[in-house]
Image: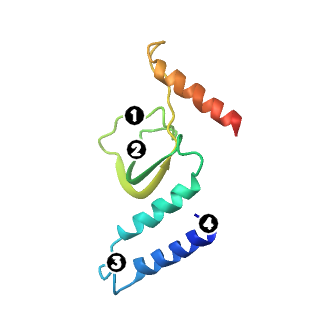
Amino acid sequence: MESLAYFIVSMLSLALIHSMVYNTRRLETIGYTLSIVFLQQLIAGHEDIFLICPQFPLYVSPRDEEPSPDVTMPDPEAKGVYVDHALLLPRASQTEGNRLKLSQVFSQAHSQRNQDL
């Protein structure tokens, strides 16, 4: 679809979302379709490495000394929120010896993908 067509679809979708006639309860779920279309356009050509996740939970713990996706501490007191949409870039890491071959294949494919860009 052309840029102009996406602009028109976006404007009509926003009008529907903010309409008090068609969306009297101001439900946010109507906007998910618009957001997904926007995110799909954002990652066009890279769908094999990104994931679009609506209503994604995020947790923050004061026990985590530095924010790292690889090292977290269990914490029953962690505070969490749900974000409307998250765009994830999965990372594979090897945790034990040479047993996990899938992570090596994924890491090689991901690094190869970065070199091709």
Decide: is 18 above or below 33: below
Looking at the image, is mark 3 or mark 1 nearer the viewer?
3
Residue of label 3: 26
Tell me the quadrant of the picture where the C terminus can be found.
Answer: top right
Discs 2, 4 touching: Cβ within 8 Å: no
**Secondary element type, mark 2:** loop
For the residues labelled 2 and 1, the Cα–Cα distance comes to 8 Å
For the residues labelled 1 and 4, the Cα–Cα distance comes to 46 Å
Residue 45 x, y percent position in the rendering:
60, 47
Q: Residues within 10 Å of mark 3 (few under 14, many from 20)?
A: some
Residue type at numbered disc 4:
Glu
Discs 2, 1 touching: Cβ within 8 Å: yes
For the residues labelled 2 and 3, the Cα–Cα distance comes to 33 Å
**Secondary element type, mark 3:** loop
Residue of label 4: 2
Residue 110 x, y percent position in the rendering:
59, 32
**Left or right of 29 in this view: 4:** right
Number of the label disc, if any, that sits on residue 61 = 2
Q: State the residue in front, 74 or 81.
A: 81
Number of the label disc, if any, that sits on residue 73 = 1
**Secondary element type, mark 1:** loop
Looking at the image, is mark 2 or mark 3 nearer the viewer?
3
Residue type at numbered disc 2:
Ser
Which of disc 4 and disc 2 is earlier in sequence? 4
Q: State the residue in front, 68 or 89.
A: 89
| Outermost top residue | 98
Q: Quadrant of residue 26?
A: bottom left
